[in-house]
Structures are given as structure tokens and as C-alpha cells.
Image (cartoon, grey):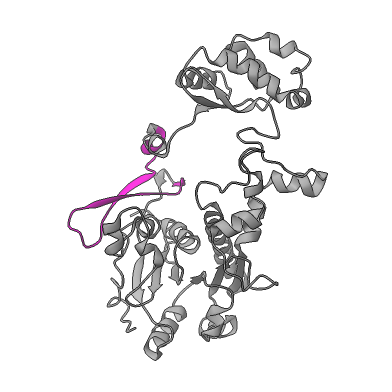
Amino acid sequence: MQQLPLDGVKVVDLTNVLAGPYCSYQLMLFGAEVVKVEMPGAGDLARRLGPDPELNRERMGASFLAQNAGKKSVELDLKSPAGRAAFESLVAGADVLLENFRAGVLARLGYGWDRLRELNPGLVYCAISGFGQSGPMSGAPAYDQIIQGLSGMMSVTGTPDTAPLRVGFPICDTIGGLMAALAISAALAGRPRTGHGCFLDLSMLEASISAMGWTVSNYLISGVEPEPMGDQNATAAPSGTFETADGPLNIAANQQTQFETLCRVTGRPDLVTDPRFAEREARKAHRQALNQELNRALRAKTALEWEELLSREGVPAARILTVPQALALDQVRQRGFLTEVPFAGAGERQVTVTGNGVVVDGVALRPRGSAPLLGEHNDEFEVVS
């Protein structure tokens, strides 16, 4: 079996639904053993979320299956003496404790950082919450949509007529999970040097604002307040969605040479010398006129024809696909991004799940087993809820 960077790392995972489970899924893909601690008889709420009512009734909802393959499940009630004893035993033998309760919940159960550090001085404890463990909003409830709105993300999504809009997937949960996985990996890497663990307090709000990159820095550094621009790129032109004979095409001719090549390939070399479009800032100022000229030329071929032609010439261009079309791309399938794993407790049924886009020593990261049934590994860890 392939040796992975986090082989031998043990993670006790108290998380629920998405941000935390997405984090521990990444750690699992890199080789960590993840023990998912769930409430007896109920489990992760995601077990009951998804478009298939039958799977939801079985507590194996699609939302749960997507982020929990390769993990183990134990049932523990942290309010019962037996459950607390089992939890403390798990923590004592773990490298990482991960939770995404509202700020202060675990501490009120008697497991603040001081107590956790007593149980395991080398523990890396990561708490994911909407706003962090401190500050005036720390106790407020938060889901992805709440963070999308508060971060400013929704204000720049859509057009001036349609904004604010929610991004079409739970992006703040995903960002929070990724940042938590990065922070945990960094803490594990530094632990041999420091000789002790640490407490990682992760704010989804702050992580999301950080991930907005130039949208935020343009305001902080240059005082330019960002505005919604639909499918256009504020930093360059032509860069956005264009019209072809059969549908939309994304083009990002962000460099001067790419713009000149685009004009040549589309049969419009005259645009290069047009004063409105000759240089970068002029093109941004006359974006609408430039887009209209290019759309007229691009309607001569299909989106796929332009994608192949422009890509060969070094101009970034591609169709806009649906999710099923994206998953069907040969590029995605040939790299081993999708994996079939057994459906726990259901004979020979298989479930397809994603990796994370990382290939280690030529091998794509993928789960080593199915998503667990609720409490499937109680006996393995000798826990009594």
C-alpha cells in the first residue's frame, strides 16, 4: 500500500455536516485515521441530507457519503460518564481533535483547551466556528449562507442588476474546511520541533474574506470598492464569457500576447491597433465595445471548436459545462479523481466519490473504504455510549 504523508496520524472528529467533515476528509485522503464521534442514535445531520429520501431514511444521505468515505464511526454521548470516559481515552491516544460546535460548547462540556492539554500535551486541537472563539459575534450561529453574506462575497456575485447572489455551492464551508486542514497539517509539521501541540481557533468568516484575495486587497490597498461584474474579470479585458455559434465560451486573454493572438485567430487583427483596445487599461475602459466586436467574430464557430483552436494557440479558453459534463471529462477521469467505494451494509452496491485533485508520487489520493454506518466501529474502540 502507498505510504501517504499523514499515515499514522490519528484524528478524533466531532464535526457535523460540512466544514469539519470536509476538513477531516482531506486529512483522511492524505493518510490519517479519522474516528468520527457521533451522537448515539442520531449521528451527523448530513446522514439525513441529500436528494434521495431512501438514503436519508437509512442515515446514509448523499451529503454524508460525499465527505465521510474512509472514516470510522463511534457513538458517544459526551454528557454520560461512560461516553466521557471513552472520549477521554480517544483524545489521549490522538494526534488531532477537530470540532465545529458553536464557540465555547466543548468547553462548557468540560473539555476546554486546558483540560484537553492535560489529557494529551501533544494534541493539536482545531475548533472551526463561524466567527472564531472570541469577539462580539463569537456566540452567534452561522451557516454557509450567513458567512457568504457577511464576508462581502454575495455583494460581488452576480451582475449589478442581480447581486447580491449566493455562490451556487457552500463555498464558505469548503474554504473553512480547507483552511482547517492546512492549519492542522502545519501544526503537525511543527510539533516535532516545539515538542507540544496547539489550539487552532479557525473563523470561517475570516478564512472566507482571506480567500476573496484581490477583491479585498484592491480595497485595502487602493481604496477601490469592489462591484459585481457578472461573468467579467475586473483585472483584465477581454476576460469573461463570450457568445459562440452554440453556446457560451470563457476566454481569459489576460496578457497582451494572448489578446493579439485572440484577435488574429478570430480574424480581427484590426482590434489590436484600435486605440480603444491597444493596451490593457484602454481595453478595460472599453470592455463592452470590445466584447461586442469579439462576439460577432466568435459566432462563426462552436464553443468546442474555439476551445480547441484557441487553446492550441496559447489563449486560455473553454466551454461552460454542467456538473455532469465536468465529471465526464477525460481529463478528470484519467487522473483518478473519481473513486468507487462500497456502500456500507448494502451488498455489492458502489458509491462514487471525489478525491481532492492531489496526486502523490503518481497516485491519486482516494479513500480507502466506504462511509461508515452509524456506530459501525464501536466494538473496535471498545466504546460504550
Residue 219 pos. (x, y %): 77, 47
Relative to 279, say whether 94 is above or below. below
Left or right, residue 224 beside residue 380: right
Residue plotted at (42% across, 66% down): 8
Instruction: Decide if residue 198 is in sight here.
Output: yes
Q: Which residue lies furthest to the bottom in this view?
A: 81
Q: Which residue lies furthest to the front in this view?
A: 161
Q: How many labels does the image show?
A: 0
Asked if residue 30 lies in the magenta stretch, the reply is no
Left or right, residue 297 beside residue 87: right
Write the start and end of the magenta stretch as one range.
331-359
Relative to 210, say whether 306 is above or below. above
Q: Nearer the viewer, residue 92 or 147?
A: 147
Residue 264 pos. (x, y %): 62, 11
Q: In which quarter of the image is the N terminus?
A: bottom left
Left or right, residue 159 beside residue 366: right
Q: Quadrant of the C terminus?
A: bottom left
Residue plotted at (30% across, 54% down): 52
Q: Nearer the viewer, residue 344 or 215?
A: 215
Q: Nearer the viewer, residue 159 or 134?
A: 159
Residue plotted at (55% across, 47% down): 167
